[in-house]
Amino acid sequence: MAHYIALIHKDLDSSYGVSFPDLPGVIAGGDSIDEAMAEAAEALVFAAEDWSSFTGQQFPEPRTIDALREDEDFREAAVDAIVAAVPFRASVDAAA
């Protein structure tokens, strides 16, 4: 099963927010880390279903954590973030 690397941020007065470096604009959130991770997994499926109609491109393959660490933008965004792997449970048809 594929996993997408996610960044989880939380300000003192907010819920947990999740973003995906490989999927600009795909976000999720929750009042707890567990809730945010569950919402993030659902956001991946939802994004895969509509990605090509919104972007005109195929759903991006996830980069490895090693590849992301070479990306300066990722390193900057990961400061003060929890880095997590979110399972991608969409069918192959949804991602195509």
Image (spheres, rainbow, N blue to C red):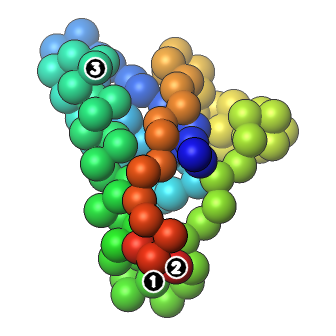
Secondary structure of the residue carrying tag 2 is loop
Q: How busy is the neighbourhood of tag 3: few (under 14 within 10 Å), some, or many (20 plus)?
A: few
Q: Residue at x 41, y 73 (%)?
A: 94
Front residue of 85/82: it is: 85
Cβ atoms at labels 1 and 2 below 8 Å apart: yes
Q: CA distance from mark 1 to mark 2?
A: 8 Å
* First in sequence: mark 2 vs mark 3: 3
Q: Is residue 86 left or right of residue 49?
A: right
* First in sequence: mark 3 vs mark 1: 3
Q: CA distance from mark 2 to mark 3?
A: 28 Å
Q: Residue at x 30, y 62 (%)?
A: 46
Most extreme residue toward the top, as rendered? 12
Q: How busy is the neighbourhood of tag 2: few (under 14 within 10 Å), some, or many (20 plus)?
A: some
Nearer mark to the viewer, of 1 and 2: 2
Residue 57 visible in image: yes
Mark sitting on residue 52: 1
- Amino acid type, mark 1: Ser
Where residue 60 appears, as percent x and y from the top left, is 60, 66
Cβ atoms at labels 3 and 1 below 8 Å apart: no
Front residue of 72/87: it is: 87
* Count of numbered tags: 3
- Amino acid type, mark 2: Ala
Q: Which residue is mark 3?
A: 34
Q: Is residue 43 above or below residue 40?
A: below
Mark sitting on residue 96: 2
Residue 3, by quadrant, is top right
Q: Is residue 60 above or below residue 73?
A: below
Q: Is residue 44 above or below residue 70?
A: below
